[in-house]
Amino acid sequence: MASPVSVFNSNALDTHISSTSRESLKMELLADVTLLPGEERIIDKDIIYICPFSGAVKGKVLITNYRLYFKSSDADVAVMLDVPLGAIARVEKMGGASSRGENSYGLDITCKDMRNLRFALKQEGHSRRDIFDLLFRHSFPISHGQPLFAYVTQEKYEENGWSVYKPIEEFRRQGLPNNKWRITFINKNYDLCDTYPTVLAVPFKSKEEDLRRVAAFRSRGRIPVLSWIHRENQAVIVRCSQPLVGMSGKRNKDDERYLDLIREANDTIKLTIYDARPSVNAVANKATGGGYEGDEYQNAELVFLDIQNIHVMRESLKKLKDIVYPNVEESHWLSSLESTHWLEHVKLVLSGAIQVADKVSSGNSVLVHCSDGWDRTAQLTSLAMLMLDSHYRTLRGFQVLIEKEWISFGHKFASRIGQGDKNHADQDRSPIFVQFIDCVWQMTKQFPTAFEFNERLLLTIMDHLYSCRFGTFLYNCESARDQHEVRSKTVSLWSLVNSKMEIYLNPFYTPESGRVLYPVASMRHLELWVTYYIRWNPRIRQQQQSPVEQRYKELLALRDEYLKKLEELQRSDSSPSSHMANSPSPNTSSSTSSTPSQQYTHLQTPL
């Protein structure tokens, strides 16, 4: 076969060279993207990022089935974006084919994590159609009948995060069951309540048929069940939903008797019922069949905590986003922050939890509910438990607290976050869990030595609340997670955290087992969590780690180094050759058998 005749074409060669160099530049720009196992490239494209801090920046965008990644090609302006598609709330087209003005044609992306992104493309040839369609489809897989990334990823970790929380073990740690409280499996098939876990703790004297009759009188069948018991005084935190009193003021003798059983369990004189809602809202709920416990509940007192509903919280966070992104308005900062009411809401949640913790600490049992018992109720019970029980302030204990009070008891993560759903205006969306993590952060600021975990853990939890990379926060309740085989088909966030625990540890942590924390819930002592809400501002991101914390870590490393050297010296000192050279005198004690850490337990850093 004759070889083909090659014809020299300078134009073709120039085109080939320029396209090759362009391709290599593209590969170079996107070379530092480390894809996760199971992550696949979908499209990459030349694009202009309209940066709110640096102006228009040319670069390359890569979209995978997990993230949107942008890197600038301009050497003078180094800009990099790495956004999980799960964090995208809305994708819109900006401008049209006939739009005038520079960079007026492109995409507007609204994110759930306190930032917005804007990209400009060339107007000719419908250059944004493909990228818009692909981005829309992969950002909202549920709306397109596709699996969430948590089902696609093939990440492997040594530790199985799904084993962090075992209900029976956690009840045993609390000293349950005992002669006043029993464990029931009445809900093992989710027949009693489809949004509750399968393992519940209820009063010892209650019968299974009692529980069913009480479930009929509580919203969504969410009966009062034990969350936590005080080991010494046996006072309990019980959680549930509102009673179905309605406009006619219905009564239910079984429900009234059941609450009295809770009170009797530790001989509390009066059971305190904390209704998280403002009293006006609780009264209004009667119109839709709900309501609150009235005078017919003898030996009980009702306290309203005035925490607003999910819609108020959603609007409050929106206002906060408006004043922190992209730019912080310095001149009216305090009045602008006050107008969002965000810190005011944080204060009310913390204040309510303090009241719960204080009542339990003084030996009185409490019952906590809101409307359905999966939003404000979870905030109050978990924060009160964090104040009362130092176990929940450890790294693993905090994971158990989230798994127990939020995930297993049916906080509606899918509805509140909108995972994989294109309906950005859904009225069910609300930052309830974000607010809880904010409250935890406020506590870590006021008690810097009381928590084993650091701020990095809280930020990691916040990021993966939206990312859809792990199964931990998927779906609304345990029954839905079982149905979608979350535990067998996805990875737990705690697998990631517990595989590199050292980066989430607080170097200032000092264990104190019996200490109850009472944070100051006053506006003067609460701060805006700048490193979360304003972290996309380059001025904030440039701030380094606390120099005190950095120095403390250095001192700890130095101590470990000295202890290691000491151990080596002792080993060489106890070798046979050294014994031959220096025979011990009869009075010499054999202290070399103990380890350096045992001998030098007093070796502490000044901090």
Image: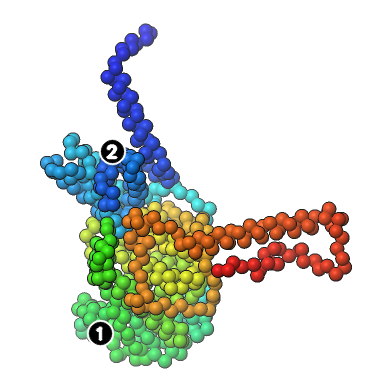
Identify the residue shown where x is 41% and y is 74%.
383
Single out the mark in the foreground, 1 or 2.
2
Disc number placed over residue 203 in the picture, else none: none
* Residue 342 location, quadrant: bottom left
Left or right, 482 with reference to 566: left
Q: Is residue 220 above or below residue 105?
A: below
- Give the mark nearest the N terminus, 1 or 2: 2
| Direction front: furthest residue | 331
Identify the residue shown where x is 27% and y is 19%.
11
Q: How far apart are the alpha carbons under marks 1 and 2?
A: 65 Å
Could you tell me the amino acid type at mark 2?
Asp
- Percent across and percent down for residue 511 are 54, 72
Disc number placed over residue 250 in the picture, else none: 1
- Percent across and percent down for residue 357 are 42, 80
* Residue 16 location, quadrant: top left
Could you tell me the amino acid type at mark 1?
Lys
Q: Which residue is mark 2?
A: 46
Neighbour class for label 1 at 10 Å: few (<14), some, many (≥20)? few
What colour-coding does the image apply?
rainbow
Residue 218 seen:
no
Identify the residue shown where x is 66% and y is 60%.
563
- Percent across and percent down for residue 361 are 46, 83
Left or right, 584 with reference to 225: right
Identify the residue shown where x is 57% and y is 61%.
555
- Percent across and percent down for residue 537 are 32, 56
Q: Quadrant of the C terminus?
A: bottom right
